[in-house]
């Protein structure tokens, strides 16, 4: 990969905005960032997703990895947890988004592939995330557990439908919609498995609950929570932001052409 000084600058901007805005939202508007099992509700993922879409995998992935490390250390204070879970999850998720968004994906294959993947994930969530497991993990009532599971399943299905509808109405965003789902699935899986594995050997920081030796199903719950709370923002908000950026800064289209050649 031939990096230009522009790529380094954009990567630094991505990291700085991701970390700073995330910290502002977390500390000044905590009601907007509830935490489940150490994983924050994190709508600020629209920042690295936008950078990944506009400027490619290196700017998106590396910038996100640096940004999440800074915010993790300042929020929960455990750099090892961030380096083993948060950093690789963000690097992979937004790197994939930046890479796949530039590809001319077959719409039929994408439609079938995403549909199959979402069906598998929804079925797995239904089988593993039982009301009893949710009650045991979160200490909620049976009704709350039932509605939590239903919301997760709905988000899986609705996210798929949004990607399909977006691809039909705005064909130029088809590849990005598919890329967002693939990136979110991979990043969320790393977080779910990573936090579960981490707690088998260490305790989570006290700032995010201090859990230790989480049960196996906690990994899938964290995966579902991460995916469900991030993908709607990436699919619905990022394309309009990118469109506005192209209108405001026409030179970005030349940058995109350069990415397409790589």
Image (cartoon, rainbow, N blue to C red):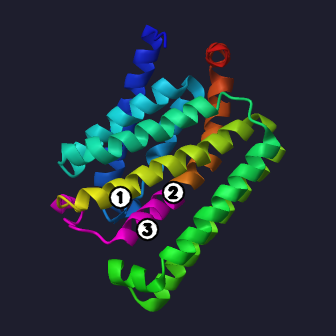
Examine the rendering and report whether any part of residue 234 can be seen: yes
Prevailing SS of the magenta stretch: helix
Q: Residue at x 68, y 32 (%)?
A: 243
Numbered range of the magenta stretch: 204-229
Q: Is residue 165 above or below residue 47?
A: below
Indicate whether residue 164 is drawn in magenta: no
Q: According to the image, label 2 marks what residue?
A: 227
Between discs 3 and 1, the one toward the N terminus = 1
Which secondary structure lies at badge 1? strand
In the picture provided, is 227 more to the left or to the right than 110? left
Counting from the top left corner in percent of width and height, residue 235 is at: 63, 48
Which secondary structure lies at badge 3? helix
Q: According to the image, label 1 marks what residue?
A: 39
Q: Nearer the viewer, residue 153 or 117?
A: 117
Q: Which mark is residue 221?
A: 3
**Crowdedness near tag 2: few (<14), some (14–19) or many (≥20) residues, C-alpha within 10 Å:** many
Counting from the top left corner in percent of width and height, residue 109 is at: 77, 44
Q: Residue at x 37, y 31 (%)?
A: 15
Between discs 3 and 2, the one toward the N terminus = 3
Task: Find the distance from the CA under tag 3 to the CA under tag 2.
Answer: 10 Å
């Amino acid at each position: 990969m031939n990096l230009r000084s522009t790529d380094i600058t954009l990567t630094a901007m991505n990291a700085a905005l991701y970390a700073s805005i995330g910290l502002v939202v977390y500390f000044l508007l905590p009601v907007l960032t509830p935490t489940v099992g150490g994983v924050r509700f994190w709508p600020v993922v629209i920042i690295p997703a936008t950078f990944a879409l506009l400027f490619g995998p290196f700017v998106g992935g590396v910038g996100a990895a640096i940004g999440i490390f800074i915010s993790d250390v300042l929020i929960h204070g455990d750099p090892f947890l961030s380096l083993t879970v948060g950093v690789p999850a963000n690097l992979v998720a937004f790197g994939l988004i930046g890479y796949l968004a530039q590809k001319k994906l077959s719409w039929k294959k994408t439609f079938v592939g995403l549909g199959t993947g979402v069906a598998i994930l929804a079925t797995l969530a239904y089988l593993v995330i039982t009301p009893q497991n949710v009650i045991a993990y979160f200490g909620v009532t049976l009704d709350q557990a039932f509605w939590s599971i239903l919301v997760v399943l709905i988000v899986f299905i609705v996210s798929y439908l949004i990607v399909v509808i977006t691809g039909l109405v705005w064909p130029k965003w088809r590849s990005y919609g598919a890329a967002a789902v693939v990136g979110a699935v991979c990043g969320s899986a790393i977080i779910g498995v990573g936090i579960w594995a981490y707690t088998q050997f260490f305790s989570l920081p006290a700032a995010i609950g201090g859990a230790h030796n989480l049960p196996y199903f906690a990994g899938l719950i964290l995966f579902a929570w991460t995916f469900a709370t991030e993908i709607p923002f990436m699919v619905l908000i990022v394309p309009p932001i990118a469109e506005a950026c192209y209108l405001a800064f026409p030179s970005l289209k030349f940058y995109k052409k350069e990415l397409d050649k790589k």
